[in-house]
Amino acid sequence: MPTDRFTAHSPWFASRRVRCGVSLLLIGHLWAVFGRPMEFATQGPFGTSPSVSMFYAPVRGYSQFAYLDHGYAFFAPDPGPSHFIQAAVTDERAERVELKFPDLEQQWPRLLYHRHFMLAEFFNDVYHPPGSPPPGIAENAMASVQWMRGRKRYETIRDSILNHLRKELPLNQVAIRRVEHRQPGLPEFIDGGIGTRDLSLLRVMYDTIDGLPERPQVPDVTPTETVIALPAEPQS
Amino acid sequence: MTNNMAPEFSPAAYGKRWIDAWDHFWFTPKAPHTLAVIRIATGLLLLYSHLVVAANLSSFLGDDAWINNETIAAIHQGDFTPPDASRSYLWNISSPALLWTHHLLTILVTACFAVGFLTRITAPLAWWLQLMLVHRMTGTLFGFDQVTTMLAMYLMLAPCGAVFSVDKSLRRKFSSKIERSDRLRWFFPDEQPSVSANIATRLIQLHLCIVYLFGGLWKARGTAWWDGTAIWFAVSNAQYQSIEMTWIGRYPRLFSILAHVTVFWELFYCALVWPKLTRPIMLAIAFAVHGGIALFLGMITFGTIMVVANLAFIPPSLWMRDRRGESSPEFAHPPSIA
């Protein structure tokens, strides 16, 4: 490449050696940008593709520190249900109110609402059932340790959320649970008249083993069994 | 033995053409105007994000946050899963006064970055402060944070404060002093095309191609994007809704077309955004898709930052008062590889 292409403001790049060095840095960076979504996309029930894992390993640390380690699976593979955290708050007179996070009525502007929305999704994503590892995992020592750590992670995050609510609402007892809010299918919506905020679309997600509700482990009170009403439909 | 291979097809000639094309792609100087527009938009969106966090600082930072300091450190340092390289000094700050001081500094630096004041310093600082914040706010982040951090990272590599900035006014005001010093000329760059502006632009463009490629590949793994119901399930998710769009459920041909166009657009964006012929179509669909996400799915910030990132494909000459000044050399002389 002729050097007269470079202006007085980019004299360093006239040197082939500099261009080679910069090129190597660019390749390394793009390797990190590409590596994580590739690794994320090649995860399966038996782990990540070994070749992709090996490909990403040299740049993993850089990718993570520079916050380049994303999967980019927006609304994919299918747009699924969303989740919220329901909190039962009982005051000194034993009167209970129920809060939900996120809540458009409480969190404004929309970005603040969305941060709470992501918190609820994160809380749901890290959920791990209680109890001992089930058969199939219990026989494998490493898998058993991972099972126990998964539960510990969920409990630590749950306790952090509870701690935050207790600091925000002193003198109250607080309990939380996860609630799933699915979308209506088209036949339900069109033929069945079920709107997007119909209570039948809500499902309380118990902290269970084998589908059996378990006694709350940390909450001071048990949230009510009924689901809370959702805000009215937004106006277009 | 005679070599019948034509000279232009010899491995050496082929390799040289690759090197020339690589040099042309990365090291052709580019004017900073498009990056300056991206800087203003990214800076303002980052500033808005920091102000929203400031309104609820104790909910996101410190020992009483939703995810407290101890928990965030445990998540990243390997207490539950293999450790990762995410690190933030904010994990160790408990003092509300110190957190407030740090956050006010973040807001101040980001505002300076947005208006282009001392950009050579405030651009890397704005990225660094954002990076520390995102590593602290795990669990409350989404695509908006991924893209703003990415743009801030690339903008700091380029003279993005050379135009549409306070720096430009300062350069004009103190031109005689600045012209005499190499250091000050670097600190207050002029709007001449530079290789660093081109590298930053290319990185944004390629990063965006990777985002869309994997976005499309993931959608192609689902069934709802193939049977066309994905748009319905997106607009009927009550927690995303900002404008009621469920009427679209009564028009299955319409919502299924939108789903199919979205998948194919994402999958082929990385190829079709480069040729001049298809680029306007790719960008038009990008603006429509992200505009729709911003308006109807309640993610105004995410939709806006994705539109901003797509501006990287707009030639700098579009933003110049005198458009004869730069003729987009990368398009005037497209590289030849094969």
Image: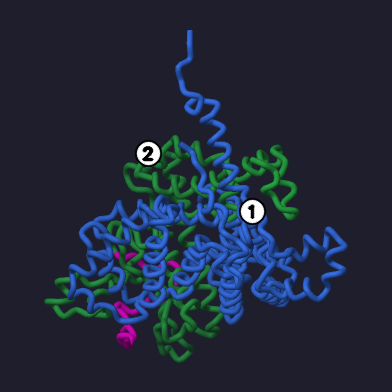
Q: Which sits in the foreground, B173 or A116? A: B173
Secondary structure of residue under mark 2:
loop
Q: Which of the chains bears the disc numbered 2?
A: A
Residue with the mark numbered 2: A139
* Residue A221 drawn at (x, y percent): 41, 77
Is residue A217 shown left or right of residue B237? right
| Picture coordinates of residue A73, whole percent (x, y) | 39, 57
Q: Give the secondary structure at mark 1.
A: loop
Chain part drawn in magenta: A213-236
Residue found farthest to the front: B324
Q: Quadrant of residue B295?
A: bottom left
Disc sitting over residue B29 in the figure: 1
Looking at the rendered structure, whether the residues under marks 2 and 1 are on a common chain is answered as no
Cα separation, mark 2 vs mark 1, equals 61 Å
**Viewer-closest of B313 and B288:** B313
Left or right relative to B212: residue B236: left
Helix, strand or loop: magenta stretch: loop
Alpha-carbon neighbours of circle 2 within 10 Å: few (<14), some, or many (≥20)? few
Residue at screen point 22% across, 62% down: B228
Chain identity for the colour blue used in the image:
B
Give me the chain letter of mark 1: B
Q: Which chain is green?
A: A
Vertical comparison of A192 with A75: above or below: below
